[in-house]
Image (cartoon, grey):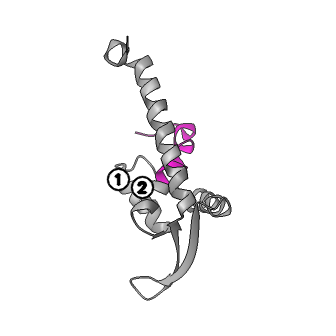
């Protein structure tokens, strides 16, 4: 299923920081992992991912460093910072509130609270 780009765009920071919280990753690895875990629903292009990573770096949420990859090639890895972990907690809280509110609207009485 292909999602509206607006829906995906609003959650990319949450998704990327979540992956980086687990382990440091290089760009293509982030793309592959997002694709794999979402059953190909999230297919970011490099031209979309790298500006997001640069913004996250400028905001102090991630840091980059160069290291040798599995095949001995230098790669640019990204790791989440302490500020990035705080931002991730905020992003998760916002997502939970947002998705609960949407579910209350579309799910009827199942999600209603009285």
**64 vs 57: above or below:** below
How far, Cα to Cα, is label 2 from label 1?
5 Å
What is the magenta segment's predominant secondary structure?
helix
The extreme left residue here reads 110
Label 1: element kind:
helix
Can you give x and y, in whole percent of width and height, for residue 24 in the image? 45, 70
Residue at the location (66% across, 58% down)? 59
Report the front residue among 47 and 25.
25
Report the front residue among 41 and 106.
106
Which disc is residue 34 wearing? 2
Residue span colored magenta: 1-16
Res 96 → quadrant: top left
Q: Residues within 10 Å of mark 2 (few under 14, many from 20)?
A: many
Is mark 2 in CB contact (under 8 Å) with mark 1? yes
Label 2: element kind:
helix
Q: In the rendered view of the protein, which quadrant contains the N terminus?
A: top left
Report the front residue among 66 and 93.
93
Tell me, yes or no, if residue 45 can be seen here.
Answer: no
Can you give x and y, in whole percent of width and height, for residue 63 in the image? 58, 69
Which disc is residue 37 wearing? 1
The extreme bottom residue here reads 72
Magenta run includes residue 84: no
Q: In the rendered view of the protein, which quadrant contains the C terminus?
A: top left
**34 vs 90: above or below:** below
Q: Residues within 10 Å of mark 1 (few under 14, many from 20)?
A: few
Position of 13 with respect to 54 (left or right) is left
Can you give x and y, in whole percent of width and height, for residue 28 in the image? 48, 67
């Amino acid at each position: 299923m292909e999602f509206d780009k607006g829906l995906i765009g609003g959650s990319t920071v949450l998704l990327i920081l979540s992956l980086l919280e687990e382990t440091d990753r290089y760009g293509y690895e982030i793309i592959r992992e997002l694709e794999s875990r979402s059953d190909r629903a999230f297919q970011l292009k490099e031209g979309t991912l790298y500006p997001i990573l640069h913004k996250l770096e400028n905001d102090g949420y991630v840091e980059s460093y160069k290291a040798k990859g599995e095949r001995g090639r230098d790669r640019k890895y990204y790791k989440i910072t302490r500020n990035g972990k705080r931002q991730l907690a905020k992003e998760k809280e916002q997502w939970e509130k947002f998705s609960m509110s949407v579910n209350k609207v579309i799910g009827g009485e199942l999600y209603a609270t009285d």
